[in-house]
Image (spheres, grey):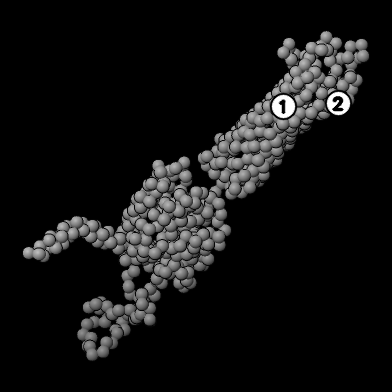
């Protein structure tokens, strides 16, 4: 009677553990078809912690079903030997090429993109034998810290199910190996009328009659495949061997081709045995849109409008003026660091100007000058959609701007020379509509940290701000040469305290104090652009 509780506990344990044991046994039986296949799991992504958490769960799930995986570092080494870099290294055909070098059957390519606390996981299974994507899925994870391991297990289970489906469709494990050599041609039949003399047998039939009974087996000459009707035996061709075709054993090791290779126009059908032997020629690498690292532009145009306004609380001063359209020469240069997507850009514009100043009884002065606008920028190219030259980019930026108006000294120095220095932040958007047309625009906003007038000033500088933007279009006649259309606008505002030192009109002496200067500038240009 004392043993009754122990027996009841054992019975309850069996009832609880029974479904789990049956499930584990069924899973192990279901995994038999893919056990031991050669699979590489390559997990990529910019956020290392998210990538590691999700990738670790996927690998553990797949090791449970398949067994040891091919290390992803072997795939990276193969890519390096084949000189596959950038986005083109992860195209299906190039992944198949790299996988073939290490004897892999499938490449599981996973990219983890962090989205705040969550992530988007893109999963692709590339069949090395066909160089095609056998499975593709996108998974959204709301919170990686809480759901990353669970989501990784689910992704791993989906991959395992797909690998089972592929393997069952092939009838077994898939390996890229060479077909067996073709059987030798049958020996020539004896001459008609000359019967073959068999030991311990008597020939009673006429020699011209067809022989009765099963034919004797052909001589094998030591060939284990002779006389076997192999469904994957290739058609014998006398063409010269193609050096681009590689033959691999079932272990993934490269070996010499058989004496007579199969015809490239008639690939053999798959085998129905336990292992599929695939006759595979590596496809040519895909053409991937290249990234650019240098942009240069030279253009000519005009300063469409430039207004200079000196004002106080009582209104604008007579020293305000507006320039007529001026000829302009512009230059821009941009250098982009590959992979880092960090760039440096220089924009410069030069406009010669001739002023006409009516001095009344003193006559008219015609001083010459030069307007210079220079911007030094550091930016980051964030690819929102697409890749390479066809990528839609959002480009945040920061930089320094120097605007100078150099004026030749003249009678009274009514118009002083001025230099304006400011710092700014902003953003550009670059949108390639297609391979021919590209639209680009941007805005910036900053502070004026220094403003200097010579030889006489409008007062004590109290700082100011700047703002502006640009919009342009590129027409790429060739992948490297294009025609550029640009329009730029800028607005500068500077405030002063106290009375100005510069000469004033007689009716404004003593009334102009605590003045402000605003400069509004519009420029347009057409030129040529280069990119490499």
Read off the residue under disc 1: 463
Q: Which residue is mark 2?
A: 455
Task: Find numbered disc 2 in the image and state the secondary structure of the residue it sits on.
Answer: loop
Judge from the rendering whether residue 241 lies leftward or rightward of residue 198; answer left or right: right
Q: Which mark's residue is nearer the viewer, 2 or 1?
A: 1
Q: Residue at x 64, y 37 (%)?
A: 398
- Residue 201 located left or right of residue 349: left
Residue drawn at 50 percent across, 49 percent down: 47
Residue lying farthest bottom?
200
Q: Residues within 10 Å of mark 2 (few under 14, many from 20)?
A: few
Q: Quadrant of residue 503?
A: top right
Q: Quadrant of the N terminus?
A: bottom left
Q: Quick one: 401 or 240, which is closer to the camera? A: 401
* Location of residue 215 with respect to 21 vertically, above or below: below
Q: Residue furthest front?
A: 2
Which one is in front, 398 or 239? 398
Q: Is 37 or 56 nearer to us in this picture?
A: 56
Q: Residue at x 32, y 70 (%)?
A: 229
């Amino acid at each position: 009677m004392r043993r009754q509780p122990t027996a009841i506990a054992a019975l309850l344990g069996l009832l609880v553990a029974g479904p789990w044991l049956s499930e584990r046994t069924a899973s192990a039986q279901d995994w038999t078809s893919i056990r031991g296949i050669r699979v590489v799991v390559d997990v990529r992504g910019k956020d290392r912690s998210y990538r590691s958490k999700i990738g670790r769960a996927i690998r553990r799930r797949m090791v449970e079903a398949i067994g040891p995986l091919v290390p992803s570092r072997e795939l990276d080494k193969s890519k390096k030997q084949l000189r596959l870099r950038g986005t083109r290294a992860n195209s299906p055909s190039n992944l198949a090429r790299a996988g073939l070098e290490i004897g892999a059957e499938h490449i599981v390519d996973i990219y983890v993109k962090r989205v705040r606390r969550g992530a988007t996981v893109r999963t692709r299974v590339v069949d090395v034998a066909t160089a095609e994507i056998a499975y593709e899925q996108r998974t959204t994870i709301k919170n990686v810290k809480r759901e990353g391991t669970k989501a990784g297990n689910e992704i791993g289970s989906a991959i395992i199910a797909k690998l089972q489906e592929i393997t069952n469709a092939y009838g077994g494990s898939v390996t890229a190996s060479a077909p067996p050599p073709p059987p030798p041609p049958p020996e020539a039949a004896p001459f008609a009328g000359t019967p073959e003399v068999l030991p311990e047998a008597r020939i009673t039939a006429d020699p011209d009659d067809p022989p009765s009974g099963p034919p004797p087996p052909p001589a094998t000459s030591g060939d284990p495949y002779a006389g076997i009707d192999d469904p994957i035996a290739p058609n014998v061709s006398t063409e010269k061997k193609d050096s681009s075709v590689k033959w691999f054993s079932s272990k993934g090791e490269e070996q010499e081709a058989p004496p007579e290779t199969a015809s490239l126009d008639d690939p053999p059908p798959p085998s129905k045995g336990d292992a599929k032997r695939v006759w595979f020629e590596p496809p040519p690498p895909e053409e991937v849109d290249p990234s650019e690292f240098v942009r240069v532009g030279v253009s000519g145009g005009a300063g469409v409008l430039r207004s200079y306004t000196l004002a106080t609380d009582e209104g604008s001063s007579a020293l305000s003026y507006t320039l007529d359209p001026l000829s302009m020469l512009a230059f821009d240069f941009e250098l982009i660091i590959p992979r880092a997507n960090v760039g440096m850009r220089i924009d410069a514009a030069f406009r010669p100007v001739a002023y006409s100043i009516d001095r009344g009884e003193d006559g008219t002065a015609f001083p010459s000058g030069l307007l210079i606008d220079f911007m030094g920028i550091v930016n980051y190219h964030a690819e929102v959609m697409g890749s390479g030259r066809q990528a839609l980019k959002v480009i945040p930026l920061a930089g320094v701007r120097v605007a100078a108006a150099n004026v030749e000294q003249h009678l009274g120095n009514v118009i002083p020379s001025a230099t304006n220095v400011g710092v700014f932040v902003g953003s550009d958007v670059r949108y390639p509509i297609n391979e021919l047309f590209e639209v680009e625009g941007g805005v910036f906003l900053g502070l004026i940290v220094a403003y200097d007038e010579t030889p006489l000033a409008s007062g004590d500088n109290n700082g100011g701000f700047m703002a502006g933007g640009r919009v342009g279009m590129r027409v790429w006649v060739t992948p490297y040469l294009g025609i550029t259309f640009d329009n730029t606008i800028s607005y500068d505002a500077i405030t002063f305290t106290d009375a100005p030192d510069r000469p004033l009109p007689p009716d404004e002496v003593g009334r102009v104090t605590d003045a402000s200067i605003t400069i509004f500038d519009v420029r347009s240009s057409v030129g040529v652009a280069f990119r490499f």
